[in-house]
Amino acid sequence: MHVELSEKLYYGIGEVAEAFGVNTSLIRFWEKEFDVLQPKKNAKGNRKFTKADIKNLELIYHLVKERGFTLEGAKIHLKEEKSRKTLSNFEIIRKLENIKSTLTKLKNQL
């Protein structure tokens, strides 16, 4: 899954949940479960997610929703050396999907 968000420094939890097609409660739950997610909170306590947080959420989403990992399995996978390879492969797949989308748009314009 590739999440398309505008070019901002911070994203609210509603924007993030909508981009992933999930409830805000799932994002909050994953935040508690995965140490890698550490969104900043403003004075009101509202979560503000950075691009790095979004990237980590994409990886968690990929592992849990697309590859069918359990939460414990995803946590272990993220901590192991394999996570570097998965992240690398995940980023390559994401870039290829973007290229495919661009090429499809160009083809449709012909």
Image (cartoon, helix red, strand yellow):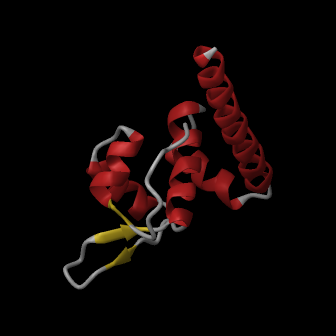
Q: Residue at x 39, y 64 (%)?
A: 32
Q: Left or right? Give the position of 7 relative to 80.
A: left
Q: Which residue is most to the bottom?
A: 43
Q: Left or right? Give the position of 101 relative to 11.
A: right
Q: Quadrant of residue 84?
A: bottom right
Q: Nearer the viewer, residue 35 or 12?
A: 12
The quarter of the image holding the N terminus is top right
Q: Quadrant of residue 108?
A: top right
Residue 7 location (% of width, % of height): 47, 60
Q: Left or right? Give the position of 31 relative to 43.
A: right
Q: Residue at x 63, y 21 (%)?
A: 104
Q: Nearer the viewer, residue 24 or 9?
A: 9
The number of numbered discs placed on residues in the rendered structure image is: 0
Q: Compared to 66, does 40 lie above or below?
A: below
Q: Residue at x 36, y 70 (%)?
A: 48
Residue 66 location (% of width, % of height): 56, 32
Q: Compared to 77, does 67 lie above or below?
A: above
Residue 24 location (% of width, % of height): 28, 51
Q: Residue at x 41, y 42 (%)?
A: 20
